[in-house]
Image (tube, rainbow, N blue to C red):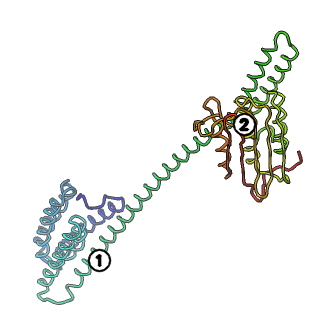
Amino acid sequence: MATDRPRTTPVARVLRVCLHLLVAGLLGLAVVRALAGRDGDPVEVTAAVVAMAAVYAAGPLIGAVGRSRRAAALWLALLGVTWVGVLVATPDGVWVAFPLYFLELHLLGRRAGVAAVGLTAVAAIVAYSAHQHTLSVAPAIGPLLGAAFAVATVFGYQALYRESEERRRLIDELTAARADLATAHHAAGVLAERERLAREIHDTLAQGLTSIQLLLRAAQRALPERTEAAGEYVEQARQAAQDNLDEARRFVRALTPPALESDTLPVALERLCATTSVRSGLPVRLHVLGERVPLPVPHEVALLRIAQSALGNTVRHAGAGHAEVTLSFMAGEVALDVVDDGAGFDPEAVPTRTTGGGDGGGEGGYGLPSMRARARALGGSFAVESAPGEGTALAVLLPVPGEAGDAKEGPS
């Protein structure tokens, strides 16, 4: 088949079979009418019909006709010659022009097909007029209407086919784009979940394991002279390990932190300050300012995790004498400030990904970036001020929605 013709579809195959049957029926009708003595000599008509039928039947069997437009044109020319023989033998050959129109339009393309249809229509009109021994408008109406119908039908079908192919192409592109988008969303979700787990582990398990390590070192230094003090350190380390185990189990179940399951944020922060003071010996005080309002659970979780990370790093890196945690409720906002009088650091000199909080030092971990990411995820801001020898001040400001449907109320 020529390269610029549509591919064969089930509908096209059915139409092709119908076209073959139509040609066979019209040729057979011409022979029957000739044998009945209606039109033409039976022998001449039969011979012309057999010749045309043979040429027509050879077309589908010749593969080149379907692949090459030149081969198709040669076959149609030979078929046209045999059809002219049928026209000369009987006027009934005029009706065979109708299926020839479709063949020419299908095999020759637009311009050549329309030209061939015009020549076929003229030949049909002339032959029929010759048999009638008169030239008038009436014999021309049938071939011309048939030609117009064939052109409109074929061109309409081709236009619909092109439109359906374009729609199929667009659907394929849309399907591919949706698949790419789903892959990108999946990758983004994996990265976001990885980031979330990294923050959670840093702010809870890592801090807890550090506390356990410090407590066990203190117990080791107290032995063997101060066994009672060593026992207290070991008990605190055991409690810290239990707390971390609870956190780990909640990571698996993706639940609220244990400290917020039954208490409000101020109560959880009060407990955090007291625990930090007991386990590290660093005095930590909590101040709650403003009229307390219920906060959404994500806000409470973020502020508690930021406080845990900040105090953990203050204990490990600041060498501070004391620390202050301030929770401020304001109109439409909530603020958390963590201040210590430790060694301080240069925020500009801290690597992009570093453990921060009290002093931003550490093992190249996740402190300051983690806290900043938590604040920005809720539409808030994060700032840290520090200088060597001048301590550290960390501030987080989060907007509070008008209605906190998931928040918990209750005094500290």
Q: Which quadrant of the figure has residue 257?
A: top right
Please, what secondary structure does the residue beneath circle 1 have?
Answer: helix
> Is 223 located above or below residue 54 in the figure?
above
Residue 376 image offset from top left, x and y in percent: 65, 49
- The residue drawn where x is 11% and y is 83% is 130
Q: Specify the quadrant of the image occupied by residue 134.
A: bottom left
Classed neighbour count for the residue bearing mark 1: other residues with Cα under 10 Å, few (<14), some (14–19), many (≥20): some
Residue in the picture at 19% in, 89% down: 137
Q: Quadrant of residue 121?
A: bottom left
Can residue 324 be seen in the rendering of this structure?
yes
Coordinates of residue 20 in the picture (x, y in percent): 26, 64
Q: Which element is circle 2 on? A: loop
Task: Pick the quarter of the image with the N terminus.
Answer: bottom left
Residue 98 or 401: which is nearer the viewer? Answer: 401
Count of marks, rendered view: 2
Instruction: Determine if residue 252 is in view.
Output: no
Query: For this view, does 160 lie left or right of residue 387?
Result: left
Q: Is residue 156 left or right of residue 70?
A: right
The residue labelled by disc 1 is 149
Q: Position of residue 281 (x, y in %)?
A: 82, 27
Q: Which residue is mark 2?
A: 391
Q: Nearer the viewer, residue 273 or 87?
A: 273
209 to 21, vertically: above or below: above
Using residue 132 as the reference point, say whether residue 162 is left or right of it.
Answer: right
The quarter of the image holding the C terminus is top right
User: Which is nearer the N-term, disc 2 or disc 1?
Assistant: 1
> What's under tag 1, amino acid-wise?
Phe
Residue 179 lies, with reference to residue 360, above or below; the image says below
